[in-house]
Image (cartoon, helix red, strand yellow):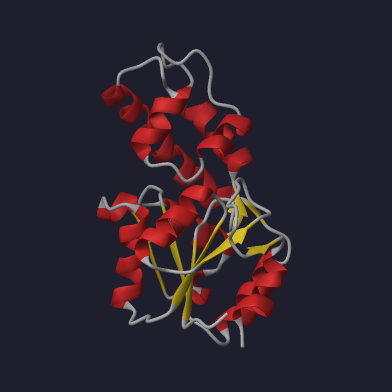
Amino acid sequence: MNCDGVIFDLDGTLWDATDELAASWAQALAGEPDVPRPPTKEELEKVMGMTDKQLVAVIFPQVEQARGLALFEKCCAAENIYLRQHGGRLYEGLVPALEALAEKLPLFIVSNCNLGYIPAFLEAHKLDSLFQDWECIGRTGKEKWENIRLVAGRNGLKHPVYVGDTAMDQASATKAGVPFVHAAYGFGQAPGAPAVHSPQELPGLLLP
């Protein structure tokens, strides 16, 4: 596949941090009177990649949006601290695949996450040197497709590719005018897209 840079989604593409999110959210939500129980790992898997408003409508349907967003913000603060300390589960073969790609192409991350989430990922797993730039809705307030274009533009990319695991990622890449590769080992489906079933397949697909 002809490209001059690779932009990655994070959850379901580079790592699975749902166990750690469930643990940190349980701590953050303990004692909140309008939260009968914290979300499970399985429930969190289903909302990966959603915007904050979409997510709180699913996870906290019993409260008004403003209250749900406040709860979400509290959970985000807790998860960033937790993830910096504990990390998440990197997909098998991820680091060698990233190292092989980074020798030939610049790598980036664009995710619908809070401001501290990508830095927590990079810090916990010592991956800063492999990525040249990143962006998220928590910093810009922009939709994912806009952030894909933003990263491509400020890094001079003419033919980037976006790697993600859900139909939402596929739609964002399409709206941004960027080819999409489906990380089929992640959380979602993306019918019709070129797919890899392990990060180890990415260099063979993306490198000349």
> x, y percentage for residue 15?
60, 54
Please name the residue shown 32% across and 67% down the image. 149
Q: Quadrant of the C terminus?
A: bottom right
Above or below for 89 versus 135: above
Quarter-wise, where is residue 34 in the image? top left
Q: In this view, does 199 lie above or below 76?
A: below
Q: Is residue 73 visible?
A: no
Residue 197 locus on image (x, y percent): 71, 60
Looking at the rendered structure, the number of numbered marks drawn on it comes to 0
Give the side of residue 18 with respect to residue 62, left or right: right
Q: In which quarter of the image is the N terminus?
A: bottom right
- Tell me the residue at 42%/69% (across/down): 178
Whether residue 160 appears in this view of the structure is: yes
Q: Where is residue 90 in the image (x, y as percent from the top left)?
A: 65, 57
In the depicted view, which residue is nearer to us: 47 or 169? Answer: 169
Question: Which sits in the foreground, 136 or 174?
Answer: 174
Q: Is residue 201 above or below residue 189?
A: below
Could you say which quadrant of the image residue 40 lies in?
Answer: top right
Front-lying residue, 179 or 128: 179
| Residue at image coords 47%, 46% | 49
Q: Quadrant of residue 39?
A: top right
